[in-house]
Image (cartoon, coloured by chain):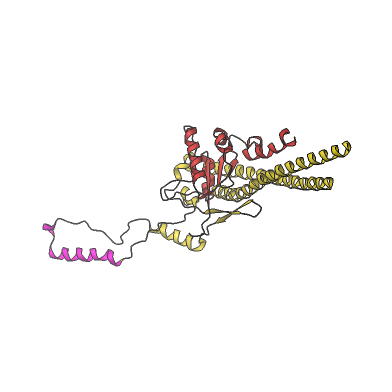
Chain colours: A yellow, B red
Amino acid sequence: MGISELEESSLLLDEKLMRFMDQLELLEEKRAALNSLIEQGWFSMSKARYSMGNKCVSALQYASEIEPLVYVHARTLDTGDVDFCTERVKQKCGNEDGKDAKSIEDIGPQEKGVRRRIKPKKHITEEEASEEASCEKAPEVTPVRKHDPNPQQDPLKWFGILVPQTLKQAQSSFKQVVELSAEIATLQTAVLNSRQELKHSMKDKHILQEESSAAQLDNRAD
Amino acid sequence: MAGRGKLIAVIGDEDTCTGFLLGGIGELNKNRKPNFLVVEKDTSITEIEETFKSFLARNDIGIILINQFIAEMIRHAIDGHMQSIPAVLEIPSKEHPYDASKDSILRRAKGMFSAEDFR
């Protein structure tokens, strides 16, 4: 009875150990992929820096308003593992481009039409006064350009409008790294949980072993 | 946003931070607190540790990415973090390649096969 129980716990332990080893192997594989992707990203960034100039790809170019484009959802599973999955904020590609193009065109004086300096009142004749009044009214009619407070801007645009292809490659590498890092985070928690389970199973097995050996000694004594 | 997920924070050198920010993880919240720290030559260990602890305390951060050579500076703080969320991931840096033997998680996993466990 005791021996079969011991065998059972040993089998369970083996199974858990195999799962643990598989997880470690997978973690190592993903780590290698992550490291090579990061390296690729840096290499592309260095190429971009070479073509744009040394100071053109640095922390100085970060925008004053930064909105995240990636979120990570952490879900605790029944087994105690935590599943991390990334979600990318959808950028309106077609509209966004059009909007951006428009915003680039709009750079310049905010008020349309010719502005006129306000002259001291004593020199203003009646004609000029009426003309000025019409000018003042004009900006009310023209729609004021709405400033978008939350532009969800592509970080690539911090570095200029026409950025080199290599910077785009760097961005895509790092996007992949972000996704992979969520997978690695999931695996890491799974590895730690498996380790805990293994420890508990090993303790149980030791207890069973001690019990069975004690029982065997008793039998021999009898 | 009601169903908004968590953020990914990064503590690293300039290139690492720039890369991840290009990837779209950056945020400056209402209090203008960033979810990243660019570690320069003159950044003190205290500052790094405080930032790391503040990231751990924030409940809107799900994963913390940290360059391994910076993680080495605050190893005690990283080893002391036992929760699953936020997950701490050590990543290589340009001058310091990734060394699995230094990784907190892998060292913990390796500890499984120490002599004590087999007693």
Question: Left or right of A112: which side holds B36?
Answer: right
Residue drawn at x 29%, y 67% as measured from the top left: A141
Residue drawn at x 88%, y 37% as measured from the top left: A220
Residue B19 within the segment the image draws in magenta = no
Question: Left or right of A78: which side holds A102?
Answer: left
Residue that extends furthest to the left in the rendered view of this protein: A122
Q: In the image shown, does B105 or A128 lie closer to the viewer?
A: B105
The reply to whether residue A57 is visible in this rendering is no
Residue A150 percent across, percent down from the top left: 43, 56
Residue B118 percent across, percent down from the top left: 75, 36
Q: In the image shown, does B7 or A120 lie closer to the viewer?
A: B7
A116 is higher (above) or lower (below) than B80: below
Q: In the image shown, does A16 or A119 lie closer to the viewer?
A: A16
Residue B16 quadrant: top right
Question: Left or right of B86: which side holds A191?
Answer: right
Total numbered labels:
0
Q: In the image shown, does A44 or A75 lie closer to the viewer?
A: A75
What is the quadrant of the C terminus of chain B in the image? top right
The reply to whether residue A210 is visible in this rendering is yes
Residue A194 percent across, percent down from the top left: 69, 46
Residue A214 quadrant: top right
Residue B95 percent across, percent down from the top left: 58, 34
Question: Left or right of A207: which side holds A196?
Answer: left
**In the image, which residues are magenta?**
A121-141
Q: Main secondary structure of the magenta part?
A: helix
